[in-house]
Image (cartoon, grey):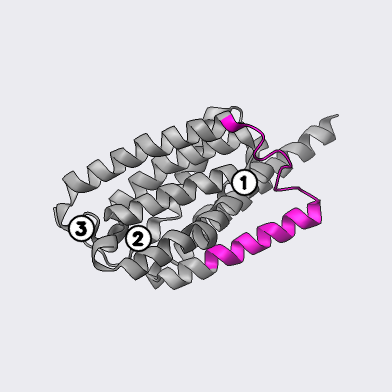
Amino acid sequence: MTIKILNTNLDKQIRFCEMVLLFIGVPLSIIESKSNLVMFITLNAVALMCVIYFKKKKIKIFNKDEFSNPKFFKYQFLRVFFIGSAILIFSYIYDQKNFLDLPKYNLFLWMIIIFVYPILSAFPQEIVYRTFFFKRYKHLFDNKITLVLVNAFLFSFAHVIFMNPIVLIFTFFGGIIFAYIYSTTNSLVKVSLEHGLFGDIVFSSGLGVYFYHLTAIQH
């Protein structure tokens, strides 16, 4: 019994160090690059490794009943509508100069982002920060609140490369929403959909300018 407890504690310590290395060390290792491309490549490389891990461990990341609860999508629509409206209002008040600048001045780029971001950015992020994180590190935390808050912090920290407080604040609260959704639904599809929608709203609102490197806040 004693040996079993020691092995369990050792496993937790190893996984904790692994978690810190992956979710703190990797973002810090690319911070000097100040490159969206480097961040994109790193994200998708890690997401691919997570998928390989799932396959090796025979972990299913998709549920057969993903769309069996219409009530969830009703609440999801309302959540996206109200929070999305708040994001637009904040964008208008905080930075009128850039409000809706992308759809107004670069419609083609905006359309590309609207379709590409949910698939090539939001989805890989959710593979890493929700599915992999919860499957591998959930047992390190004593309660759901701590799990959600730590996950949100690490998700926000992943954006430290942008060196922007607006980005860190938005991604922290976004991380809380996404972590809560995943913890209650265990659905990669549902959380990725919501992440993608919020991301599209942020880029459309004008706040997307803060998600590029060397962006200065002029307030």
The residue drawn where x is 78% and y is 40% is 7
The residue drawn where x is 53% and y is 39% is 179
Mark 3 and 2 residues: CB-CB less than 8 Å, in contact?
A: no
Residue 194, how many percent across, how many down?
49, 44
Residue range corresponding to the magenta coloring: 42-70
Residue 82 is left or right of residue 94, and the answer is: right
Write down the residue under mark 2: 162
Mark 3 and 1 residues: CB-CB less than 8 Å, in contact?
A: no
The residue drawn where x is 52% and y is 29% is 145
Q: Nearer the viewer, residue 213 or 71?
A: 71
Q: Nearer the viewer, residue 175 or 74?
A: 74
As drawn, 143 above or below 107: above
Q: Which of 2 and 38 is in front in this view?
A: 38
| Residue type of the residue flagged with mark 3 | Asn
Mark 2 and 1 residues: CB-CB less than 8 Å, in contact?
A: no
Write down the residue under mark 3: 98
Q: Earlier in the sequence, mark 3 or mark 2?
A: 3
| Residue type of the residue flagged with mark 2 | Phe
Eye-nearest disc, 2 or 1: 1
Residue 152 is left or right of residue 109, and the answer is: right
State the SS at label 1: helix
> Hey, which quadrant is residue 1 in on the image?
top right
Residue 43 is left or right of residue 104, and the answer is: right
Q: Which of marks 2 and 1 is nearer the N terminus?
A: 2
**Mark 3 and mark 2: Cα distance apart in space:** 18 Å
Write down the residue under mark 1: 188
**Mark 3 and mark 1: Cα distance apart in space:** 32 Å
